[in-house]
Structures are given as C-alpha cells and as structure tokens.
Image: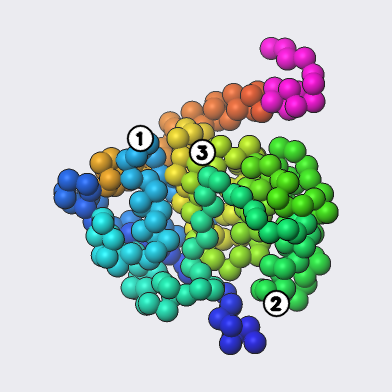
Amino acid sequence: MIEFLGIGENTINELTIIAGYNKHGEKESFKELTIKKGEIISIVGPTGSGKSRLLADIEWGAQGDTPTKRSILINGGKIDKSARFASGNKLVAQLSQNMNFVMDLTVFEFLELHAKSRMVENESEIIDKIFDKANELAGEKFKKDTPITSLSGGQSRALMIADTAILSTSPIVLIDEIENAGIDRKKALDLLVGEEKIVLMATHDPLLALMGDKRIVIKNGGIHDVMDIISEEREILHELTKLDNVIQGMREKLRHGQKLEL
C-alpha cells in the first residue's frame, strides 16, 4: 500500500542550483551551487530582492521554465515531471511566515491524522516525539488536546517544524523568516539538520545567517554572491548568541511578569 500510494522515503543526497538571470537579464554571478544533505544555507538580501523567488524555484524544481531561468538538479540529475508535480511524497516542504490552521482538530488529532496517512508503524511514539519537540521550540507550551486553530503563530510554527522534521518525507525544507516565529531558532535548525534535511532559509537575522554553512546574497532578483561562513564570523556568532540569550531571558521574564534588570 505504501508503494502504491508513493509515500516512501525520498533519497536525496544533494541539490544543485544552476545559475539563471536577474531582473535586468544579467547572468547570475555563479555557475552552480551544490548543497548536501545536513547543510544549512541562509538566503539574505533586501526586502523585495528575490529571496522568495529563489525558494519558489527550488520548491517547483525549476527547469529553466521560471522567470529567473534557473534549473534545479537532484543528485546531479534533472527532476522528472512525476516528481515535480506529484500531489504526495513531495521533495520540498515549505514553512512560510504565516501558518494558519483551518481544520477543527486538536493537536493530537492533527498529528494522528498525519501519522496514519504516512502509515508509520510506531504511531504513538512518533506523535509523542513530535509533540515534545514542538513544545521545546515553542515560547509558550501547549497540550495535546489544544485545538490547533487556537495555537499562536509561534506555537503553530513550532508544531509544523517538528512535524516536518520527524514525520514528513520531504528531504528539502525551505523556511521563510523563522526569526518572526517566536520559537527557539537554534533548536529548530538543529532538529531539522539532525533529521538529515537540506535546509534553506530566507532571513534578515544576522544570528540565523551565521548559523548556516553558506549564505546566498540576493540582489536585483538574482544570486549576487555565494559566501562561506569564515572563522571571524563564527566568532561574531558566538558574541551574538550571548546577546540573544540575554534578550531571550528578558523575554521570558516579561512573559512571567517578572521585573527586568541588567
């Protein structure tokens, strides 16, 4: 039945982006970029520069047939139509800025429904794992009997990140501005990478940008540069992490009605 429905594992070791053109019709300033399983790539650039367009090209498995004329390869080869336009067993899971539920289900019922659709053998164990991980990410804890329509934006994003990491078969995860989600960002990325996903995230947050293995710089709708994270920037990341811990600590104090002190 699993084979018949096409919901098996997607074995993807690498994704390659072949250069296209920017808004002015100029060739992008790289030839190709290969991203391997377990890597995190940040995508940075001004608002409206084309970050979401790059995510869309990857999600659609572009084959020179989008406005940028980019092509996406999987394991070094072109993506066939059955993989690009399949309704199930998708190659890409995208977590957008707004995660709004419309189903009248509890958190448990939602996870149970997804687990049953994937025909997992250890259903209860998987549901518990997703629920526990989601609560680790969320700023405010929630229960299994909480209606998903009453979850906050941060709680919804935490639930979907945990669900995508643990239960989704999609090997590529695209994240749009996770910094606005009100969740533990480092834990979210560690969870996704720990499940051997390829992670690409569009962000304006220097902390997140430096957590990646590389960063793609977008200008005028095209990829302007691909930069490695150098050792000096890793040192900056260490300092930014300390500052972020202070801010997160004060945020928790505010949530619990405590007095703020330096």
Q: Quadrant of residue 131?
A: bottom right
Which of the 4 quarters of the picture holds residue 181?
top right
Image quarter of residue 89? bottom right
Judging by the rendered image, the residue that carries numbered circle 3 is 208
The reply to whether dot 1 and dot 2 touch (C-beta < 8 Å) is no
Residue 152 in view, yes or no? yes
Q: Position of residue 14 (x, y in %)?
A: 43, 64
- Would you place residue 68 above or below residue 126 in this image? above
* Residue 229: numbered disc: none
Residues in magenta? 249-262
Q: Position of residue 37 (x, y in %)?
A: 49, 61
Disc nearer the start of the sequence (1/2): 1
Q: Residue drawn at (30%, 67%), measured in percent from left and top? A: 63
Is 9 left, or right, of 108 in this rendering? left
- Residue sitting at x 47%, y 75%: 86
Question: How far apart are the two marked residues, 1 and 3, measured between alpha carbons?
Answer: 16 Å
As displayed, is residue 240 above or below residue 43? Answer: above
**Where does the image place residue 87, in percent across and percent down from the top left?**
51, 73
Give the residue drawn at x 61%, y 65%: 168
Task: Kindly state the secondary structure of the residue where label 3 is placed.
Answer: helix
Instruction: Indicate which label's residue lies in the foreground, 1 or 3.
Output: 1
Mark 2 sits on what residue?
119
| Quarter the C terminus occupies | top right
Q: Nearer the viewer, mark 3 or mark 2?
A: 2
Magenta segment includes 39: no
Label 2's element?
Answer: loop
Neighbourhood count class around disc 3 (C-alpha, 10 Å): few under 14, some 14–19, many 20 upward: many
Give amino acid for label 1.
Answer: Pro
* Horizontal side of residue 41 vs 196, given as left or right: left
Which residue lies under the disc numbered 1?
46
Q: Residues within 10 Å of mark 2 (few under 14, many from 20)?
A: some
